[in-house]
Image (tube, grey):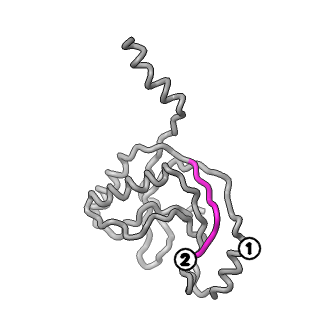
Amino acid sequence: MENYHITLRFIGDVDGRTADEIVDRLDRIDRPEFTLSLNGIGSFGSKKPHSVWAGVSPAPEMFALQAEIERICQRIGLPPDPRKFMPHVTLARLKTCRVDDVVNYLAGRGDFHTAPFLASRFVLLSSKESVGGGPYLTEEVFPLHEARSASNFVTRDLQPLKSML
């Protein structure tokens, strides 16, 4: 299970100084934890399938986190990620599979879904260039803060107003 993840931004090979700057900037991100679930299943590579994936429920907080990471990478000087962000979890990498076999496999699992789970952190992963797709090594862990309820915002934000009245 440790190699399953949602790629928010692929960075690629960078020098040590750039890597340190990325870690420093990611460490400053202050965003709330959020709930996700996996829904649906599909494959990449229509004529020659190369991987099977599970879709991720759209969570505005996840898209905001991904956009902030993308802005950070571009400010540091990395080129924009050319791919549109499509949140997914790669379940399997396929070496030699027939299209019909993949279609039959997916057809029986169209209703795939998980219970909601909490995303309380994001991580910086690395992998060996020659391996491709793992194994991954966790380089840094960045916690997300506890989500505040709407009632906490109202109570906290009105306190200064009460003292002014």
Is 139 displayed left or right of 118 in the figure? left
Tell me whether the residue at label 2 lies in contact with that at label 1, contact meaning CB atoms closer than 8 angstroms: no
Residue 148 percent location from the top left of the image: 51, 35
Q: Looking at the image, which residue sits at the far top?
A: 165
Q: Dot 2 lies on which element?
A: strand
Q: Is residue 28 magenta?
A: no
- Local packing at callout 2 (Cα closer than 10 Å; few below 14, some 14-19, many 20+) is some
Residue 109 sits above or below residue 94 on the image: above
Task: Kindly indicate the quadrant of the structure image that contains residue 130.
Answer: bottom left
> Separation of disc 2 and disc 1 at Cα?
17 Å
Q: Which residues are magenta?
A: 35-44
Q: Is residue 41 magenta?
A: yes
Q: Residues within 10 Å of mark 1 (few under 14, many from 20)?
A: few
Residue 108: image tag: 1
State how many labels appear: 2
**x then y, percent, for residue 132:** 47, 76
Q: Residue at coordinates 54% horizontally, 28% vertically from top-left? A: 151
Q: Which residue is mark 2?
A: 44
Where residue 38 sits in the image (x, y, percent)?
62, 59
Name the residue located 32 percent from the left edge and 51 percent from the top edge.
24
Which residue does the image show at 57% across and 60% down from the upper left? 56
Quick one: SS at disc 1? loop
Q: Nearer the viewer, residue 36 or 158?
A: 158
Q: Earlier in the sequence, mark 2 or mark 1?
A: 2
In the displayed image of the protein, which residue is found farthest to the front? 165
**Amino acid residing under circle 2:** Phe
The quadrant of the rendering that contains the C terminus is top left
